[in-house]
Image (spheres, rainbow, N blue to C red):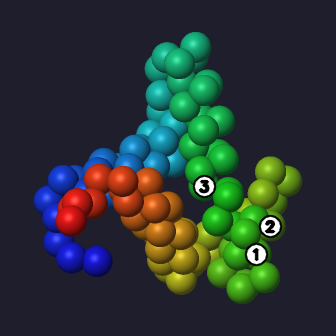
Amino acid sequence: MSFFARRWKIIAAVMAVIYFFATIGLWTMLMLPVVGTAVFIAGLYIWFIPGIVFVWTGFFDIHEFGASPNGIAGHIVMFLFYLAIAILISLPFGRRK
């Protein structure tokens, strides 16, 4: 995978949106209840999907709604999971031969 600026901009944008939903969802829900509730629920799903997929690793704690990262290793696994998704999303924007 060689460097191609447009593709890496898309990867960065996808990662920013994922972490925006995951971290800003609660604040948005409190300030803008109609829009914020959807952002908060999207943030919950974003936060818990890697935990459900990788719960067997021990890097995630189980909760009622799924799993959340347990320490820095859980956050690294979550970041790598979403980085892989961002790379897959950006595949059509790669360099054409």
Answer yes or no: is residue 12 visible: no
Q: Give the position of the N terminus as an image quadrant.
A: bottom left
How far is the residue under mark 3 from the one under mark 2? 12 Å
**CB of mark 2 within 8 Å of CB of mark 1?**
yes
User: Which residue is at a point 23% across and 60% down the rendered structure image?
Assistant: 96
User: Which residue is at a point 63% across and 75% down the rendered structure image?
Assistant: 70
Name the kind of residue labelled 1 in the image. Answer: Val
Answer yes or no: is residue 55 visible: yes
Query: Is 40 situated left or right of 61 in this image?
Result: left
> Which mark, by number, is residue 62?
2
**Mark 1 sits on what residue?**
55
Relative image position of residue 6 (x, y in whole percent): 18, 53
Relative image position of residue 10 (x, y in whole percent): 29, 51
Determine whether 69 is above or below 14 in the image: below
User: Toward the viewer: 29 or 35?
Assistant: 35
User: Toward the viewer: 21 or 15?
Assistant: 15
**Mark 3 sits on what residue?**
47
Name the kind of residue labelled 2 in the image. Answer: Ile
Q: Quadrant of residue 12?
A: bottom left
Tag 3, which secondary structure? helix
How far is the residue under mark 1 from the one under mark 3? 13 Å
Q: Nearer the viewer's eye, disc 2 or disc 1?
A: 1
Q: Residues within 10 Å of mark 2 (few under 14, many from 20)?
A: some
Q: Residue furthest top?
A: 34
Tell me which numbered mark, 2 or 1, is placed earlier along the sequence.
1
Query: Is 75 situated left or right of 87 in this image?
Result: right
User: Which residue is at a point 46% across and 61% down the rendered structure image?
Assistant: 88
Determine whether 27 is above or below 57 in the image: above
**CB of mark 3 within 8 Å of CB of mark 2?**
no
Tag 1, which secondary structure? helix
